[in-house]
Image (tube, rainbow, N blue to C red):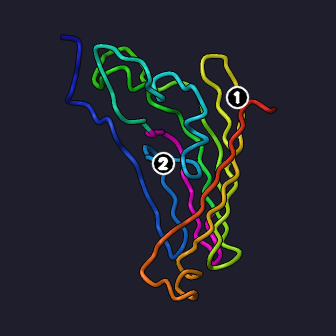
Amino acid sequence: SNRNYGEILQRFASYRRSRFQATLGHFYTIVGSGLLAHAFELPGVITEQRGSRRRYQIVRDLDGLHVRYGLPWGSLQLLRGTPVNSGLPPGLQNINRRQGTIQGGSLELQPHRHLDTGLSLIHYEIGGRRETGAALNARLRLAPLFSALGIGGTYADIYGEYAQRDFS
């Protein structure tokens, strides 16, 4: 077999201070609530084909830089990295499982304690293909309203998200 499982496949350095976090190296993430990333057909990342190696989850493994900053009224996330082709097993010699670049970020805001909103952007270049996309989302938390109406112990949210790709 031409596989070498003795090499380091995941490596990273992470720094945290108060509301700031930065990771350099391998990291796992989604952009926004995840709909935007699902709108892209990244080879080896979005898996909808059945084959000999079935994968039932989306791989969000990037190698690059990931920065998060928490704010009193929301959060900011920025990233740039190279995705892994999960169709290839780790340890193959002379085969690069990482190709292309993904960069983007998200801004999550809480303008009111019952309302969350977000904006996400992503751009990728893989195999000569370039694509850009954006998503907007909002969540209205209804539990406090139900409680004020005397319907305690009831939890409900209204959530919506719109994503569009390749509008650049």
- Judged from this view, the residue extending furthest toward the top is 1
Q: How crowded is mark 2: few (under 14 residues within 10 Å), some or many (20 or more)?
A: few
- Locate the N terminus by quadrant: top left
Viewer-proximal residue among 68 and 110: 110
From this view, report whether residue 72 is shown above or below residue 98: below
Q: Position of residue 113 (x, y in %)?
A: 62, 79
From this view, report whether residue 66 is shown above or below residue 59: below
Q: Position of residue 114 (x, y in %)?
A: 62, 76
Viewer-proximal residue among 96 and 32: 32
Q: Which amino acid does label 1 sit on?
A: Glu
Q: Which amino acid does label 2 sit on?
A: Thr
Magenta segment's dominant SS is: strand
Q: Position of residue 124 (x, y in %)?
A: 64, 31
- Judged from this view, the residue extending furthest toward the front is 150
Give the side of residue 2 with respect to residue 149, left or right.
left
Give the side of residue 125 with respect to residue 30, left or right.
right
Mark 2 near mark 1, Cβ–Cβ under 8 Å?
A: no
Element on which disc 2 rests: loop
Distance CA(mark 2)–CA(mark 1): 19 Å
Q: Quadrant of residue 166?
A: top right
Q: Residue 45 carries which label?
A: none
Element on which disc 1 rests: strand
From this view, report whether residue 133 is shown above or below residue 111: above
Q: Which mark is residue 131?
A: 1
Q: What stretch is highlighted in magenta?
A: 60-75
Q: Residue 29 carries which label?
A: 2
Write the residue at 36% across / 44% down: 11
